[in-house]
Image (spheres, helix red, strand yellow):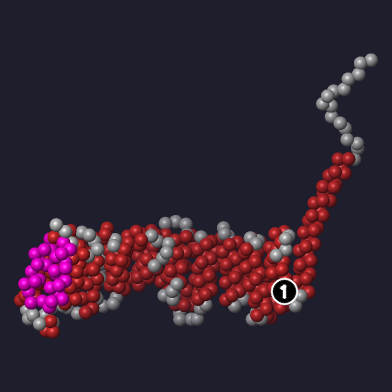
Amino acid sequence: MNVYVKPFSKRVRPPGTLRALVLLCFLGAGMAAGAQDTILNSYQRNFMRASLSTKAGILLDAATDDRASEFIGQLYEYALNFSLQNAEILRGDPDLLNLTVIAARGAGSSSHTRSVDTLWNVFNAFRDSHAKIAALEALAVLARGNTQIVENLNQFLANQNSLYRSNMDVDVSTISACINALGVLGGESSFPVLFAVIIAGYPEPLGTQAAEALEKLPGDTKTNLTEILRKNPPVEKLAVFQAAVSSRGMTDSEKGAFAQTALEIGMQKDSAVNGNGSALALLCSLAIRTITALEWTRADQVVLRYFYEVQSEYQENRTPQRLEPLLEAISCLAVMNSSDAAQALSLQLGYLNSQFERTVKDASSGAYEESLVLGVINALGRLGDRVAFDNLHYVGYLDYPERIKAAAREALNNLIW
């Protein structure tokens, strides 16, 4: 009788073996979960039994446990809930505040997102700035994508802005942390309240922080800032410009272009440059200084228009208030590297020479303004354009003081042929 066995025949397990294996798997999983619960429960029991002064130490010890990743986020939330339960009675207790700060920071570092609502409640329950700031820093990490938390923070910041504008006391450090949190969370709805910080007149660095936070929001922030510069009242134009150009988030090229736009806008209204300290006059002055510092040569034509405007203002009323914008414009033209700028300044020097020649040549008589003559000569020397040769050369024939003649000789030596 021939007998053979199939080489790949399936072996049949004895009845009940499969059920036993499945049961063992469930038991193993249950034991693991039980072990985790046991670790967490153990720390919770120790936490509740400890005195208030030692509870923070338990959290710090738990963070060093090799198994911390399994339970530490839940333990921090447990501690935060303890703080909330006792906030009304022990709100100012230093041990409770220390515990709250450690638990809030820990929740953020453990990425325990379930603590978001608890952290928001902690923020509202405590008046202490350290506790509030710790909660805000944790929310900045854990609440990304949480539109409700973003709206809550927007409302808080809006309220603080209103209080500050009403000359009420506010906690600047908490506002700073809120601004940073909104920048990290990146909700587009935060743009209005962050801009409101810029125009509220807070002490620095809050305005700069708000400008940097705005740049982190979705959308074209620079376009939004330019729209504010174009449409908002003069005081707000000035505030947004100051914040934007001091921001570390803008490149020098972006700041130069923004300053050019600000100068154009500042000159749009009648008598925008009136030398009386108005917001628009100050906006133009700051824009000119920024263009000069950055040597933003693309603004040469705008700067020329500004030069002619302040030159006309000075001719109408030769006061120190009118002279300062003119000197700033001349300094700006000196870095424009433009033949148009050189031509304008050379004509200015020719006019000053003729005026000096026709009037009393004593500086004490007020017949000429020495700082203006020197400013034009030095600017022409920096530009080095030979178009200025005749007027610079003529300075030596006039009865100017030696320091002016020396400046003219130096400028002549700098001309490029």
Q: How many marks?
A: 1
| Image point (55%, 64%), residue name | 150
For disc 1, the marked residue is 55
Report x, y in % for residue 24.
Answer: 85, 47
Camera sees residue 396: yes
Magenta highlight on residue 403: yes
**Which residue is drawn at the image coordinates 86% and 31% (left, top)?**
11
Q: Is residue 2 magenta?
A: no
Which picture quadrant has residue 226? Answer: bottom left
Is residue 312 at least partly visible in the picture? Answer: no
Q: Nearer the viewer, residue 341 or 404?
A: 404
Residue beneath the point at 52% across and 62% down:
184
What is the quadrant of residue 148 in the picture?
Answer: bottom right
| Stretch of the chain drawn in magenta | 387-415
Q: Name the dominant secondary structure of the magenta segment.
A: helix
From the viewer's perspective, tell me whether residue 289 is left or right of residue 309: right
Q: In the rendered view, does 78 fall on the left or right side of 184?
A: right
Q: Position of residue 249 (x, y in %)?
A: 42, 62
Residue 277: where, in percent of width, then height?
Answer: 28, 77
Q: Residue at 31% across / 66% down in the picture?
A: 293
For residue 329, side relative to residue 199 (left or right): left
- The amino acid type, in three-letter code, at marker 1 is Lys
